[in-house]
Image: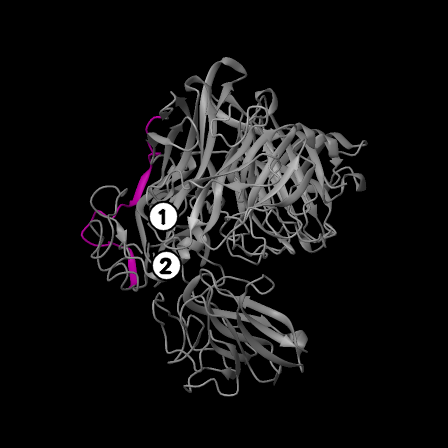
Amino acid sequence: MSSGRVSRHARIRMIAAVATVCALSATPLAPQAVAADTSSHSETYRPQFHFTPDKNWMNDPNGLVYFKGEYHLFYQYNPGGNSWGDMSWGHAVSKDLVHWKELPLALSHDDNEMVFSGSAVVDRDNTTGFGTKKNPAMVAIYTSAYKNGGKQAQSLAYSTDRGRTWTKYQGNPVIDIGSKDFRDPKVQWYAPTKSWLMTVSMSAEHKVRFYSSKNLKDWKLQSEFGPAGATGGVWECPDLFPLAVDGDKKKIKWVLVVNINPGGIAGGSAAQYFVGDFDGKKFTADDKGTYTPPTGMVMQDFEGSDFGTWTTTGTAFGQAPAAGAMAGQGTVDGFDGKGLANSFHSGDATTGTLTSPSFTVDSKYLNFKVGGGRHPHVDGTVMEQGDPPAGTVLADFEGGTYGDWTTTGDAFGTAPATGTLNNQQEVSGFLGDGLVNSYLDGDTTTGTLTSPEFTIDKNYVNFLVGGGNHPAGSDNPTAIELLVDGKAVRSATGSDGEALNWASWDVKDLAGKKAQIKIVDDNRGGWGHLNVDHIMLSDTQAQPVSQETSVNLIVDGKVVQSATGSNSETLDWASFDMRSYAGKQAQIQIVDMNTAGWGHLLADRFTAADTAAKSVVQRADWADYGKDYYAAVSWEGAPNGKRYMIGWMNNWDYGGAVPTTPWRGAQSIPREMTLRTVDGRVRLTSRPVDSVTSLRHKRPATAAGVTVKNTSKTLIGPAAQGKALDIEATFSLKDAARFGLKVRTGAGGEETVIGYDTTTQELYVDRTHSGAVDFNSTFPGVQTAPLKAKNGKVKLRILVDWSSVEVFGGSGEAVITDQIFPDPASQGVQIFAENGSVKLDQAVVRHLDSYRD
């Protein structure tokens, strides 16, 4: 991938996992009834006051417009299942942005195109001729994603019955530049020129284009913006709107929202924004000045003729620093001086490590530059694949046949594969000469492969697995399953990579049971295949092998902090917080254990400093600092000039794997957006829409004047417990290093920590122990947002739903949105303080009802 060569399989993957991010599908435009509602809306993780469809997959919000007393929410929707596919525009309406009614499908996929993301306007002057001035048409402007060739272009559909039925414009598409990465039009009426304005993404180029039109049909290019800010992923779902600064209608600034995936502030998907000026043709972002990193003691800058006292293993890093790009590599930039560490020696297939000598930690931060592949360190992995544990091999697929295993369908063929199949990226990590590989004739084939019955007589079932990440239980899985009495009791899937790695099931509780192994490929989309090898019973759990490309900090022999690249050959600043390791011995280790696409790492200028360096991503502006706020766009035509925004409450890192059924995907709470001057800089701020208060119970639980020191204590008592809460809290800083609230606390240590770090001046959410977190390695973790205390106080507004938290800090300049999947019994709320004490001035906890009540 880094050399610029992209295989057919990689393109398929990118189309499925990237180009579809802001996508929906085209429709046979007659109204289609929503399937009978079989949901009680009381499923374990069903949001109560966030919109979800009754069933099936939902992602980006689309077509947000206010018309005749209704807020319209269209959204990317799969009418046929609970995973991404057959994208279409679903539809819901609300009178207050809180109580939603799901309507029949609006725009549906068809044989020719999918209807990807877009917007909707009310054509009040009938510029299109689709309606009349007395009955203006609602016009949807969407991206046609053509199935033949993958081209993306902008098209129209219209409705003259308040969005209930739709007709596609016969002259579609209205803008076609022949691109496969041209999508997500946001259209508005621009009064100064009496014309329509379109903001649309050139996603792969990290650009936004602006077009104008008098009739929504004939468009003229006005200008482009970008690249700028964060560019570690594709730019999608742009939005442009004016807001008064600090409520002063004489001081108007324009906000350009550009959603990015991956490369967001918390990893994966996120909503970036720029503040600037718009003159009707061109957007100009405010100048934020140049960045000067903190000074400090340089520990390694790779400017010498060799690595000095640093030691290497393997061949990936060569014998000396690189002077830039290696043979076959794209342009490398962003490093300082003449040299850097570059593990692309002989391409991505090589592996190795580069390790510093031991040193005493005597600085607050370790700053460095990093680039290359995005393959994070995973705890519990080992550096080298040794021999498999001792045990009984159930299948090693070495004999040239499947033996007494039985097949259905055509994905697995009549015999094991001997490695990589036609048009597939390189398959690695299997043992011997044979393996199961369901990429036979590509991802479009499906089938099953089932073992004969065996008795579970050891503690673990170990196996090697790779391929697609489509878990068992989803509509179209690629999974290996353990069957007992014909039912799946354990399952595993790939991680969207061709390298096989060890996985294990603990089966101690199934001792003596008769069982079978079933390998399932029921997926025809991107990464719709599975690789499996060496299935065995053992009393020893197999350890997965590292596939990371990372910079690791090692203390007491353990990796305590880690950073990875962003699938880019441009290096950027990263920082490790060293304060908790003061006085200890540490080492820096640069690791490349990945042999697939972007299987290399770049690093430079390790510097001990008293201040953390900030990356381009950290210096960018974000509408939300959480993991789960993407494709954020705003409503057109809201009453009283209000600007309301909503985002898909999910992340493409794990969006298809979140453990919900029969629906998958939720929308954030709608937010009122304002521009405020914070610390001398104009910032986009948000707060939950006021009508959330209509869901509150009348009697809140309150607490005031509570001081807590070095402990956690239950807040208020049973009255404050719950799964759906609206919490307002104000703290007065004392000497605690960290303090805040823990929500959804319960048995087994379940908790979602919402805290404030006084030393870093950051708001944070820690969902490491929030409940179910093991469905994807990128899900657990801590998200942070910069937030300065005001007059010695920190104010928080926290919305807790059955599977999410949304935290609004200060005046709404620091917002963190995270999904959580706790046990329904985990309903506690606690106050805590660490390394000192804090005073809770006041907390008000209100229970919230379902919007469906």
Cα distance in 3D space between marks 2 and 1: 15 Å
Left or right: residue 73 versus residue 96 is: left
Above or below residue 57? Residue 607 is above
Give the magenta part as a residue range: 289-313
Above or below residue 770? Residue 95 is above
In the rendered image, which quarter contains the C terminus?
top right
| Residue 751 on image: x %, y % | 66, 48
SS assignment for the magenta stretch, majority = loop
Q: Earlier in the sequence, mark 2 or mark 1?
A: 2
Query: In the image, what residue type sits under mark 1?
Result: Lys
Query: In the image, what residue type sits under mark 2?
Result: Ala
Colouring:
one colour
Query: Disc 1 designates what residue?
Result: 180
Of 399 and 680, nearer the camera is 399
Helix, strand or loop at label 1? It is loop
Left or right: residue 84 versus residue 849 is: left
Q: Quadrant of residue 148?
A: bottom left
Q: Is residue 385 visible?
A: yes
| Residue 52 on image: x %, y % | 64, 46
Mark 1: few/some/many CA within 10 Å (<14, 14-19, 20+)? some
Label 2 or label 1, whichever lies nearer to me, is 1
Above or below residue 174? Residue 390 is below
Mark 2: few/some/many CA within 10 Å (<14, 14-19, 20+)? some
| Residue 837 on image: x %, y % | 64, 34
In the rendered image, which quarter contains the N terminus?
bottom left
Residue at the extreme left of the image, as rendered: 305
Is 340 one of the magenta-colored residues?
no
Residue at the extreme top of the image, as rendered: 250
Query: Disc 2 designates what residue?
Result: 10
| Residue 507 on image: x %, y % | 62, 74
Helix, strand or loop at label 2? It is helix
